[in-house]
Image: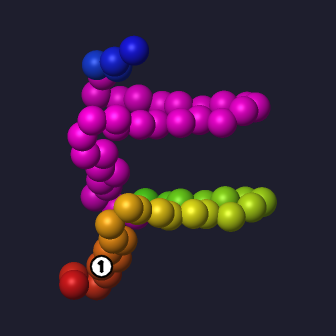
Amino acid sequence: MPIKAQFVTQSANKGAVSVQAQHDLMELLAKKSIEIVSTEDEIRISAKKKITINGGGS
């Protein structure tokens, strides 16, 4: 089900929340900070080709 909106919020009291871009790029952009937090378990980042992390203007 495509969502056509300028603001989208997803939350779940129980169960998982999944966001997918199945046929193209997905971007998370913010003028200020972005937080990725797991309060009780782990955070996994995986990629088929490579993972690039830049910081401090690099």
Chief secondary structure of the magenta portion: loop
Question: For the point 34% across and 76% down, which residue is it?
Answer: 53
Residue located farthest toward the top when viewing the structure as drawn: 1
What secondary structure is marked by label 1?
loop
Question: For the point 30% across and 45% down, which residue is it?
Answer: 26
18 in the magenta segment: yes
| Residue 27 placement, left or right of 12 | left
Q: Which residue is mark 1?
A: 54
State which region is magenta.
Answer: 5-33
Please tell me how crowded label 1 is: few (under 14), some (14-19), or many (20+) other residues with Cα within 10 Å: few
Seen from the viewer's position, the closer of residues 17 and 47 is 47
Kind of residue at disc 1:
Asn
As drawn, 55 above or below 41: below
48 in the magenta segment: no
| Count of all numbered marks drawn on residues in the image | 1
As drawn, 29 above or below 23: below
Viewport quadrant of the N terminus: top left
To which quarter of the image does residue 24 belong?
top left
Viewport quadrant of the C terminus: bottom left
Q: Position of residue 36 (x, y in %)?
A: 53, 60
Residue located farthest toward the front when viewing the structure as drawn: 48
